[in-house]
Amino acid sequence: MPTPPVPRCLLLFTVLPLLPAQATPPPTPYPQLCTAATRADADALARLARPGQVLFADGFDAEDSLAAYFEIRGRAEGNAAIATGPAAVRAGTGSLRLTAPANDGQASGSSAQLWLGDAGHDVVHLRYWIRYAPDYDQGDLHHTGGSIAGVAGAGKWSGMGGAGQRPRGDDHFSTRVEGWRDWRRHDPPGYLLTYSYWMDMRRDRDGNYWGNLLGPEAGERRVPRRGAWQCVELRVAVNTPGEADGELAVWLDGDLYLHYRGFRWRSSADVRIKRIGLLTYVHAARRDNTAWFDDLVVATGYIGTGAPARDEPAAK
């Protein structure tokens, strides 16, 4: 009986050498929400709440306060100014009023930017009190709140104006506490979360890299009450280059609201925290929207809702 022919596919398999399997690239690390675990761990909670050195403090009690900021957008137009009067002030005699004026449905805003020095820091806490106007209503999209930015080198404006682009890791990163209405599913200004740009951020469905929204579990979302003061504290700890050991945390009125671990904020040790910002910005400004900021403190450790513990006098 003749031997049946070898199928062509099998013949090719037996004659051609096996090609080496291509290595699968490791998954891109993405930060993990761990707020509940941190709250339940007294040591972890105490580590986050360890005080540090005060780097800067401003009660916005006089016009001289604004001299410390390297950029104040909207000042010439009267949209960024020191405000006085009981409704505008939480403590002391003044606050910083930032208004996003009506602009026929186009974007508008005002801001104050503070430079912490060319050397920078690896851990920074930003504490401020914020009061949204009783009629604050941004529609859908806005960026109103306080931010922390990491920068390589001495470029104070580095990374500003880079919306839609992912940082490389050796250039800059940023994060801000702001409200998110989720297309009007929540009352204005929306529940608070962080809007972050960093080297491992995820791409949006439109192909751009818009700030990633990192928030709490659905049952813990908190919408600020308009017309009332709220204390916000934002913490960023940079990662060791090459490791995903960076952190992000937020406290609201002294309670831990968010804690994320596993960040690769940067790929280079040259990127350190050097810039702080306060912003009121509305994407489609059809009316004036105002927020007041007061009792700003920047430190290398936890600040809390009261006067900060200080290792050294605050720099101005």
Image (cartoon, grey):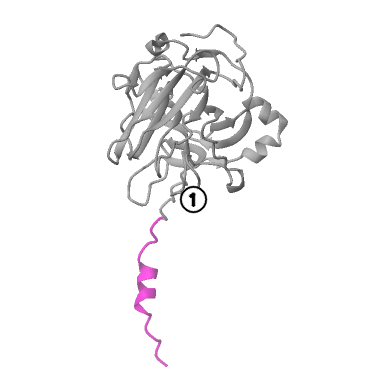
Residue 5 is covered by the magenta coloring: yes
The local crowd at label 1, few if under 14, some if 14 to 19, many if 20 or more residues have their Cα within 10 Å, is few
Q: Residue at x 42, y 55 (%)?
A: 21
Q: In this view, does 236 lie to the left or right of 79?
A: right
Front in this rendered view, residue 123 or 59: 59
Stretch of the chain drawn in magenta: 1-20
Residue 288: x percent and y percent?
36, 33
* Front residue of this view, candidates 70 and 101: 101
Q: Mark 1 points at which residue?
A: 185
Q: Residue at x 57, y 43 (%)?
A: 221
Residue located farthest toward the top when viewing the structure as drawn: 313
- Residue 130 included in the magenta stretch of the image: no
Identify the residue at image location x=44%, y=41%: 212
Give percent across and percent down for residue 244.
51, 35
Task: In the rendered view, tell whether residue 156 sits above or below residue 42.
Answer: above
- The overriding secondary structure of the stretch rendered in magenta is loop
Query: Label 1 is placed on what type of residue?
Result: Arg
The quarter in which the N terminus is drawn is bottom left
Q: Is residue 37 visible?
A: yes
- For this view, does 258 lie left or right of residue 29? right
Residue 148: percent from the left, percent from the top?
45, 26
Front one among 300 and 5: 300
